[in-house]
Image (cartoon, rainbow, N blue to C red):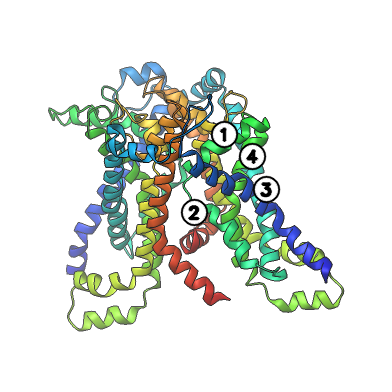
């Protein structure tokens, strides 16, 4: 009995905090369901007289062409993370199993890419892209996203590949498997866990990126989704029901990723704690 | 055998090339640019350490530096210490899963979306907070995002909302690894809950605490998106932090050399803060091999 009574303050604090945490989410949904008229004439907690979410979404696409940015960013997230996964799994396999001379130095060189704040790359990459004709191109964005994601991905694959028992590989070697076949026939099929971790974290990061998108692109058909979302809001101006609808629309992929790959989330956290 | 060596380098090459060409060479170029006076159009003029000495006299930069420090300190108190307290409160409580997922929701949303949601919450006439104040008949209608220094703290509230969940998850991970025996022993010795926490749990949490504090500090030094979305660093550059100042000097005012110098300073700070934890990692890695 007394134990329960003692717990009441804990519960009170948690419930108040939880409500504070839900309030912005709840109002975001509520506003996105309202028409502009409802939004202006109603109190913030009142339910809309009619559900206008679909109409809001249609307008968001018509006025802001948000779906185009949406597909841009899907491409950037898929291709950027894909490049990082391909490059890092190959490199990880080589550094762990083939151990070329100076393998640890090579690891440090690649891994040092996580050390610096992105501000350190902006000016030179902007210049480089202008010279190479990569400024304001999809390829340019895919490449920089791939490069940024590679060091962490390498860290994950390298850690994972050290846990694959050597015996299988030795057996394969006796059967005449070269390193290329060993990688594709033995390592790749077992790589689901690290790949899921890398995909979850890096695709989310690319999807949510604002800085590189803003600096390295200019036109609507290239700009990623978060740049479009940030420009939509201006200084808190604009049509707020539209903006809130856009917020929900743009959050769908990352929320889906989290739901689908939930069990890899803690694993990825542990890994990024260990090294990222 | 020789072929194997070639293959081993070939496998590393794509990753190495990406990182060297797009990250490491630019990083060094940025250091080089920071010694020049350069508007991006005319040829850069070497001016030695002038960009760096200017940092010390530039009022806008000093304000930005002060804001950055406010961000770091506030982050340590609210998202970090707050995250620890919430983790301790949540652990083992009925409805633990529900509470955890509630604090976790903001993590699935981008900083841009967070900034937009809170811009609405803080909006002067239409915003939820001032609306609640009116309903509660409080005579308070602050301009959350335009009053200095209130705007910085308003953005830090949004930041806390976004960040607390990460820290909570990590502290919960740490709390989960603490064995029961020392806790039971301390209770038998007559320690109350608070004493057990301070003298038993907290010291055993230290590895995680170090990591959480370092990451939180690094992230707050680098804060950009939320500020860019909520105030653009304004009004009159009053709420800029280092990352926002770097962006404005470079891409709005076209002082590329000066922007590069700010980036270098930011990197030095970030690397100094993370060095503690890089050292730990390096030690572990050497044991690994």
Secondary structure under the numbered disc 3 in the rendered image: helix
Chain at numbered mark 3 = A
Same subunit: marks 2 and 4:
yes
Per the model, the C-alpha gap separating discs 3 and 2 is 20 Å
Q: Position of residue B183 (x, y in %)?
A: 28, 78
**Residue on which the image places disc 3:** A83
How many numbered discs sit on the rendered protein? 4
B19 or B233: nearer the viewer: B19
Q: Position of residue A1 (x, y in %)?
A: 19, 68
The label number, if any, that marks residue A126 in the structure image: 1
Secondary structure under the numbered disc 4 in the rendered image: helix
**Residue A173 figure quarter:** bottom right
Q: Earlier in the sequence, mark 3 or mark 4?
A: 3
Query: Is mark 4 in CB contact (under 8 Å) with mark 1?
Result: no
Query: Is mark 3 in CB contact (under 8 Å) with mark 4?
Result: yes
Chain at numbered mark 2 = A
């Amino acid at each position: 009995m007394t134990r329960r009574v003692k717990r009441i303050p804990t519960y009170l604090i948690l419930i108040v905090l939880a409500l504070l945490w839900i309030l912005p989410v709840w109002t975001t949904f509520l506003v996105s369901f309202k028409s502009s008229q409802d939004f202006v004439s109603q109190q913030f907690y009142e339910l809309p007289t009619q559900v206008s979410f679909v109409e809001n979404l249609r307008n968001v696409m018509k006025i802001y062409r948000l779906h185009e940015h949406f597909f841009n960013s899907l491409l950037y997230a898929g291709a950027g993370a894909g490049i990082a996964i391909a490059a890092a799994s190959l490199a990880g396999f080589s550094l762990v199993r083939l151990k070329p001379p100076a393998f640890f130095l090579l690891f440090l060189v690649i891994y040092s890419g996580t050390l610096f704040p992105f501000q350190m790359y902006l000016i030179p990459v902007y210049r480089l892209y202008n010279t190479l004709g990569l400024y304001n191109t999809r390829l340019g964005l895919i490449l920089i996203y791939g490069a940024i994601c590679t060091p962490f991905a390498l860290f994950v694959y390298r850690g994972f590949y050290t846990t694959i028992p050597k015996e299988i590989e030795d057996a394969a070697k006796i059967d005449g498997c070269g390193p290329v076949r060993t990688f594709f026939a033995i390592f790749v099929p077992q790589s689901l866990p690290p790949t899921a971790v890398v995909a979850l974290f890096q695709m989310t990061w690319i999807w949510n990126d604002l800085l590189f998108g803003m600096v390295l692109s200019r036109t609507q058909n290239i700009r990623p989704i978060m740049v479009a979302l940030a420009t939509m809001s201006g200084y808190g101006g604009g049509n707020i029901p539209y903006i809130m609808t856009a917020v929900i629309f743009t959050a769908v992929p990352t929320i889906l990723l989290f739901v689908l790959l939930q069990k890899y989330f803690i694993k990825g956290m542990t890994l990024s704690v260990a090294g990222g | 055998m020789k072929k194997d060596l070639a293959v081993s380098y070939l496998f590393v090459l794509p990753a190495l090339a990406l990182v060297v060409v797009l990250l490491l060479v630019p990083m060094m170029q940025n250091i080089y640019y920071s010694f020049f006076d350069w508007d991006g159009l005319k040829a850069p003029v070497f001016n030695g350490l002038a960009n760096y000495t200017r940092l010390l006299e530039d009022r806008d930069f000093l304000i930005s530096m002060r804001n950055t420090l406010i961000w770091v300190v506030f982050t340590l108190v609210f998202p970090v210490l707050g995250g620890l307290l919430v983790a301790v409160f949540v652990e083992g409580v009925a409805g633990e899963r529900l509470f955890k997922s509630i604090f976790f929701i903001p993590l699935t949303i981008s900083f841009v979306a967070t900034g937009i949601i809170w811009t609405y919450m803080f909006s002067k006439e239409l915003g939820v907070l001032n609306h609640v104040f009116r309903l509660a008949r409080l005579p308070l209608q602050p301009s959350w995002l335009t009053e200095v220094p209130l705007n910085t703290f308003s953005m830090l509230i949004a930041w806390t909302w976004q960040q607390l969940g990460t820290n909570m998850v990590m502290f919960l991970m740490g709390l989960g690894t603490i064995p029961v025996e020392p806790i039971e022993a301390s209770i038998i010795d007559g320690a109350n809950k608070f004493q057990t926490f301070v003298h038993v749990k907290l010291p055993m949490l230290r590895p995680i605490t170090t990591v959480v504090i370092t990451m939180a500090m690094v992230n707050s030094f680098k804060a950009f998106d939320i500020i860019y979305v909520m105030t653009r660093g304004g009004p009159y550059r009053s709420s800029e932090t280092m990352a926002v100042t770097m962006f404005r000097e470079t891409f709005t005012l076209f002082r590329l050399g000066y922007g590069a110098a700010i980036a270098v300073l930011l990197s030095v700070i970030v690397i100094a803060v993370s060095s503690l934890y890089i050292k730990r990692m390096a030690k572990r890695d050497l044991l690994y091999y």
